[in-house]
Image (tube, helix red, strand yellow):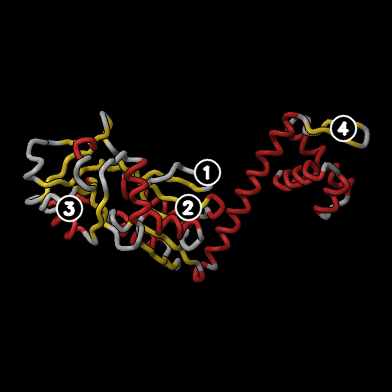
Amino acid sequence: MFQQMQYFISIVKNHSFTQAAFECNISQSAISQQMKELESNLGIKLLQRKGRSFVVTEAGKYFYTHSQDIIEDVNQLVTNTVNFEKSDNVELKVGYLRSFGTTEFLQTVSQFSKQFPKVKIKISSGDHEQLFDLLKNNQIDLNFSDQRRALSNEYHNEFLTESKFMAAVSSTVFSDFDQEIDVSDLMDIPCILISENGQAETDQAYFRDVLGIKSEFVIAKNYDEAQIMIASNQGFLIVNNRMQNQINTDIVKTLYLKNGQQQMIQKYYAYWKADNSGYYIESFAELLRDSFA
């Protein structure tokens, strides 16, 4: 039936038995006979003959659409199977969000390397914008990063985990706040951005437009400098549960960050291009997802 599906797709695509026979390198009488056998096996009409022409039935339209999906899946299966024999030349390029931490990511790399020892893994790290550009320009195959844009159908978007946003503030100045704080309570002090690569402008837009931060922004080069600024009440820093271990709790206090009644949450995904999906990419994504389960 697989071969008959290919003949049927060619007939519908060309709207001609003659052209389909030429394309499939088969005689017209033979391709006509194959179609009769296909319809007989299915027990339905896929093509309604009208003299020398035909129209595709509703069942035929359904069969045509989903036959193409099956053909594509089989072709991908063949490609992936062949790649097992050529895997000495296979390279998987993955990127991870530098500020998130490496525990789950390195665990995934280790497990993947054990399962596919012949696949060479090339790893890049960066902030959200750097990783997005690498993925967009085909410099990495898969990107593990936070969500700052609406999810696009151009990419596979595999949800991995989420983390609550927190504000790191001076423990002396904000002593009246117990567990949470609203963005409106922080309006009068600057929001500290950690930036060494000129990405401060995109971070500001994200914090302003998505998180609703109304404060002015100041720049710190690293977490140590940011905490000194917090301790001296020169600003607050937005972190999340994952980043708390980088905070000195003796001098800095972390409070869950809310906007109105809404707790601010950061989601993390594995992203890869829909037109660049493959066995190794999907296998890595599956292992990464399992590491967060």
Where does residue 107 sit, x and y in percent of width and height? Answer: 31, 57
Where does residue 77 sit, x and y in percent of width and height? Answer: 58, 53
- Above or below, 182 against 229 in this view is above
Q: From mark 3 to mark 1, how far is it between C-alphas?
A: 35 Å
Q: From mark 2 to mark 3, how far is it between C-alphas?
A: 29 Å
Sequence-wise first label, 2 or 3: 3
Q: Given the image, on which type of amino acid does mark 2 rest?
A: Trp
Residue pointed to by mark 1 = 153
User: Dot 2, crowdedness within 10 Å: few (<14), some or many (≥20)?
Assistant: many
Q: From mark 4 to mark 1, how far is it between C-alphas?
A: 38 Å
Q: Are marks 4 and 1 in contact (CB under 8 Å)?
A: no
Residue pointed to by mark 4 = 49
Q: From mark 2 to mark 4, how far is it between C-alphas?
A: 44 Å
Quadrant in which residue 123 is drawn:
bottom left
Q: Is residue 4 visible?
A: yes
Sequence-wise first label, 3 or 1: 1
Q: Is residue 239 visible?
A: no
Q: Quadrant of the C terminus?
A: top left
Secondary structure of the residue carrying numbered label 4: strand
Rendered residue at 25%/53% (across/down): 218
Residue pointed to by mark 3 = 245
In the rendered image, the residue lying farthest to the bottom is 88
Rendered residue at 41%/50% (across/down): 270
Q: Relative to residue 194, is residue 70 drawn left or right?
A: right
User: Dot 1, crowdedness within 10 Å: few (<14), some or many (≥20)?
Assistant: few
Q: Given the image, on which type of amino acid does mark 4 rest?
A: Arg
Where does residue 78 sit, x and y in percent of width and height? Answer: 60, 56
